Amino acid sequence: MTTWDSRPALLAGLIGTGIGASLTPALHEREGAEQGLRHVYRLLDLESLRLGVEALPELLTAAERTGFAGVNVTHPCKQAVIPLLHGLSDDARALGAVNTVVLRDGRRTGHNTDLSGFAEGFKRGLPDAKRDRVVQVGAGGAGSAVAHALLAIGAGRLHVFDTDPSRAEALAIALRARFGEGRAAAGADLPGAMAEADGVVNCTPVGMAKYPGLPLPAALLRPAQWVAEIVYFPLETELLRTARALGCATLDGGGMAVFQAVGAFRLFTGLEPDAGRMLRHFGEMVAARGAAT
């Protein structure tokens, strides 16, 4: 005899390239189950499907027709999705990037929960951190969200560095347009900026398992500084290990990863997620993956 699951059901997914190892589906589905919701979260991996970003319009239409409440989007779709939407949140518009699309009543609305994800993780993990002067290394898509978040939560002046100086300058211009003159600058002298910085954020891939190493010389760190990461696998990067050994306060990348999912879950379901529970679940999954490698 078949027993039907009478819980409310909701379908969502993630579109991007090389996302097979993403922890996002498990985060969403477990939190849904905890709240009495059959939350089914599917990966639409362009790499596995042998598709390019040009398939994005077709995938969005298919998601709408099959009843998806929404989709998260990641590389290489965060900018490409914007012309396909009917509206944008203020953060998504300011960043020029979308990571969450809500599909409701025939409309597609883009949001960016990377920004709110980093901000919430920072406020919880480094609540008393001084942030008059902050250095950020990396000005890509995630770096843009982090930079906007830092200024939104009170960083006085942000110096942005990137291997591509023009990218750092473009981000600094966008930040000044939104937050005011004097709040952001493209950095040219990393040692000089670090000598005056209260803290530093790594927004590059350096520190990931595939890209080991440090994103800046260890000699530039001081014990009085705080050090934050957006890399979350491994949770303890070489940068964080080095910083802790010096006595720096540190923040790993898990908070941003979880809180962007918290924001997306809220948008998709209309339910208030238990952030603490999602953080614990994330930690369990990262530990299990680390033990398996």
Image (cartoon, rainbow, N blue to C red):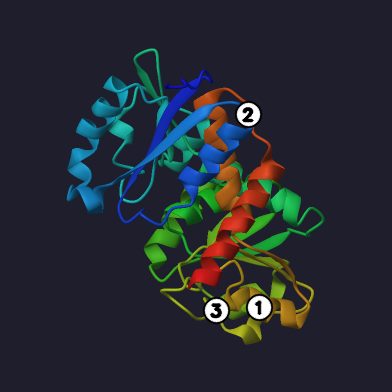
Q: In the image, what residue type sits under mark 1? A: Arg
In the rendered image of this protein, does residue 28 appear above or below residue 240?
above
Question: Which percent across, then down, holds residue 90?
Answer: 51, 31
In the rendered image of this protein, does residue 16 appear above or below residue 21?
above
In the rendered image of this protein, does residue 171 appear above or below residue 103?
below
SS at mark 2 in the image: loop
Residue 191: give its label: none
Q: In the image, what residue type sits under mark 3? A: Leu
Residue 35: give its label: 2
253 vs 7, nearest the viewer? 7
> 158 left or right of 70?
right
* Label 2 packing within 10 angstroms: few (<14), some (14-19), many (20+): some
Q: CA distance from mark 1 to mark 3?
A: 13 Å
**Would you say residue 187 is visible in this rendering?**
no
Question: Which percent across, then down, holds residue 9?
Answer: 47, 23
Residue 216: give its label: 3
153 vs 240, nearest the viewer? 240
Residue at image location 49% in from the left, 22% down from the top = 5
Indicate which disc, 1 or 3, sits on the residue closer to the N terminus.
3
Residue 241: give its label: 1
In the rendered image of this protein, does residue 11 appear above or below residue 6?
below
